[in-house]
Image: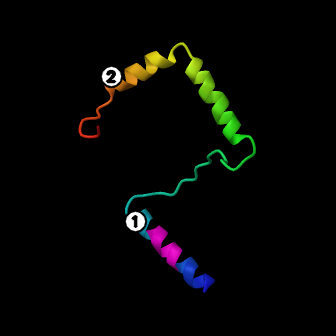
Amino acid sequence: MPQHTAARVQKHRASLRASGLRPIQIWVPDTRKRGFAAECHRQSLLLKRGVQEKEILKWIEDVSDDEGWV
């Protein structure tokens, strides 16, 4: 069974490559790690108190095309 699965995966990956795609690996923060939520909260408070944050959010709102989404 493992060989069958490996062959199927290899065939699928070959198909993706033939379509012009390539595999990549992405490392992201481990949300299960102790202290992750506290660090997110700490960083969000820094943003909330940031002098430029309101200005940046206003700019994002102004340049965003949300027609048909709202």
Residue type at the position of mark 2? Asp
- Answer whether residue 9 is magenta in the image: yes
- Residue 3's place in the image compared with 16, above or below, is below
Q: Position of residue 60 (x, y in %)?
A: 39, 25
- Answer whether residue 18 is magenta in the image: no
**Neighbours of disc 2 within 10 Å: few (<14), some (14-19), many (20+):** few
* Quadrant location of the C terminus in the rendered image: top left
Q: Residue furthest left?
A: 68
Image: magenta residue range:
8-14
Mostly what secondary structure, the magenta segment?
Answer: helix
Q: Which mark sits nearer the N-terminus, 1 or 2?
A: 1
- Residue 28's place in the image compared with 22, above or below, is above
Q: Determine whether the residue tagged by mark 2 lies in a helix, strand or loop.
A: helix
Q: Nearer the viewer, residue 36 or 19?
A: 36
Left or right: where 60 falls relative to 70? right
Residue type at the position of mark 1? Ala
In the image, which disc is placed on residue 18? 1
Number of marks = 2
Badge 2 is on which residue?
62
Nearer the viewer's eye, disc 1 or disc 2?
2
**Neighbours of disc 1 within 10 Å: few (<14), some (14-19), many (20+):** few
Q: Residue furthest bottom?
A: 1
Left or right: where 70 falls relative to 54? left
Name the residue located 39 percent from the left edge and 20 percent from the top edge.
Answer: 58
Q: Determine whether the residue tagged by mark 1 lies in a helix, strand or loop.
A: helix
- Residue 49's place in the image compared with 35, above or below, is above
Q: Position of residue 10 (x, y in %)?
A: 52, 73
Name the residue located 67 percent from the left edge and 40 percent from the top edge.
Answer: 37
In the image, which disc is placed on residue 30? none
